[in-house]
Amino acid sequence: MTTPQTISSIHAAFDKKLLSPVELTQDYLRAAKASAHNAYLTICEERAIGQAKEADRILAKEGRVPRGTYPLLGIPLGIKDVLTIDGVRTTCGSRILENYVPPYTATAVERLESAGAVSLGKLNMDEFAMGSSNENSAFGPVLHPTHPDRVPGGSSGGSATAVKAGLCVAALGTDTGGSVRLPAHYCGIVGMKPTYGRVSRYGLVAFASSLDQVGPMTASVEDAARLLDVMSGGDPKDSTSSPNAKENYLQALGRKPDWKKIRIGIPKEYFVGGLAPDVEKTIQNALKWFESQGATLTEVSLPHTSYAVAVYYIVAVSEASSNLARFDGVRFGVRLEKAQNSENLVEFYKHVRSLFGPEVKRRIILGTFALSSGYYDAYYRRACQVRRLIKNDFDEAFRKVDVIVSPVSPTTAFKRGEKINDPLKMYLEDIFTIPVNLAGLPALSLPCGEGDQGLPVGLHMIGPQFGDAEILSLAHAFERRS
Amino acid sequence: MVNNEFMQTLEDENLTRKIAALSRLELTDGEISLFTTQLKEIFQYIELLKKVDVQGVEPLTHPLDLATPFREDEVHVFPPAKDGKPKVLGSAPDVLYEGFKVPSIL
């Protein structure tokens, strides 16, 4: 497709009447339907065309894109299938919700659509966002956009592939332990997890409520800032959304970093054994660029890093086991014949919940165990205590530096089937992303080069809580390096 | 003589069965055996946390310090579906009048 790929270039083409929102939406719908990546689970053609026609109408009336009132006018987006849209099937990549049509729209999506965006459809993902490779979707794995034998990463793998393969301009993902940043790193796009509470979780089907956050997945830092500008900010429908005043992220990109004052922290615990040489080399090259601009590189220590995965696999599964109790086949979802014919309620639940896939079952059992009487103090309580120490490590580091830079994951995209039978090995892919969720920090993955076999490598930039604008601004400067 | 490892596995598998029942999940014998092995491995890994000195550390259950916001106790009418019925019944597996119908359980 030769159509422009970024929001500002699309709007310039709209202004010059080189392209109309309906034409653009039709182009993307055609590409989405023709694609063999398995990135879309549902394409909402009629709804999307309706939104594009409305954009056409606004454009005709105004003569040019009214960027103030409709900053995303006519921009075709893909939405991870864990965020609800009123009247559009939402599966969470699970058989248990195969026929679920929610009666309401997620706040993040509603804000994007109110800004003029077009939702093309719902994107494939690991079932209930549990996975690092997208092999856990009940509807089949998503293919990597450029290396078909590799995984696109998870759980927002459909979103990453759709952006990279030109099946939407930008996408929404969600990140509980790295689910936006890992696929962004594997596929070579920008993926941002905002500070916890920046974006409302209303309409996001909960996996682990104290960790989940909605984030933009885009072709450029500028587009990520544009999406975040629209969807961030407190929401009365989500009591954990932050009432902090929102920042103007796009404006932040316009400010040239005062490099002499920028202190970049390099966590020594992230550059130890297990880091693939091609990833390390690419990250070191990126760091040299920052240094050449005048930034100060400082070693920092996050001493509890090696405990983060263990903490996460107690905290996340404990929250998941209670969040997923709502899938009981009473009010929505699939109710199998054998459930309908159950003799009692316990049998009924078991039949309904037989539709969960193996990873979801595994995590529900882990979480139920961790929270069960006699084990709670040893597991959940202790994990939350170590979680505090992990957050304290970051607080301490951010007294000395403005931003922390690291790899997103120890390796580039691995081969499909390579880790699916070894859950622990799969969990360890998230060693560098998980601490960020535990501490509620903003972080993004930014393409910074290629490793072996031309596989993309992402640079992980982590900021202090509510330092979203700062990391976007530094990422933007890096992206524009010549 | 029955070896200890075998007895331990049986005990472990019974624990998996018990937790699965608490979670309202039905697992096949194959899943019980596979999950027991995998969960043991995961819990062995999690034992790592015992090495950390957590004496006096306040547990962190949520990343932000937020107060519970209160709002006015007002009714917000949820718009009905096109057929005039409550939208929330649209995805109900079974409906009776304006309620969710479940199989008889007694």
Image (tube, rainbow, N blue to C red):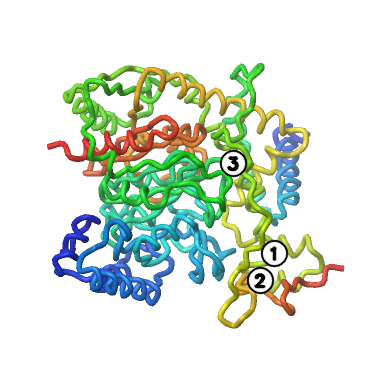
Let me know if residue B42 appears in the view. Answer: no
Say whether marks 3 and 2 touch (CB < 8 Å): no
Question: Label 3, label 2: how many angstroms apart (C-alpha)?
Answer: 29 Å
Q: Amino acid at mark 3?
A: Gln
- Read off the chain for label 3: B
Give how far across and how far down residue A347 sits, in percent: 76, 63
The answer to whether A33 is drawn above or below residue A218 in the figure is below
Say whether marks 1 and 2 touch (CB < 8 Å): yes
Helix, strand or loop for disc 1: helix
Q: Nearer the viewer, residue A255 or A322?
A: A255
Extreme residue toward the bottom, this view? B83
Which residue sits at x=61%, y=68%? B78
Q: Check disc 2: other Cα within 10 Å, few if <14, some if 14-19, many if 20+.
A: some
Q: Which circle marks residue A336 in the picture?
A: 2
User: Same chain for the residues at labels 1 and 2, yes or no?
Assistant: yes
Left or right, A114 with respect to A452, comes to right
Left or right, B55 with respect to A109, comes to right
Q: Which circle marks residue B99 in the picture?
A: none
Q: Amino acid at mark 1?
A: His
Question: Label 1, label 2: how many angstroms apart (C-alpha)?
Answer: 7 Å
Let me know if residue A237 appears in the view. Answer: yes
Q: Which residue is mark 1?
A: A351
Q: Check disc 3: other Cα within 10 Å, few if <14, some if 14-19, many if 20+.
A: some
Left or right, A102 with respect to A13, comes to right
Helix, strand or loop for disc 3: helix
Q: Amino acid at mark 2?
A: Leu
Q: Nearer the viewer, residue A348 or B92?
A: B92
- Read off the chain for label 2: A
Give how far across and how far down residue A227 sits, in percent: 35, 51
Q: Which residue is mark 3?
A: B38
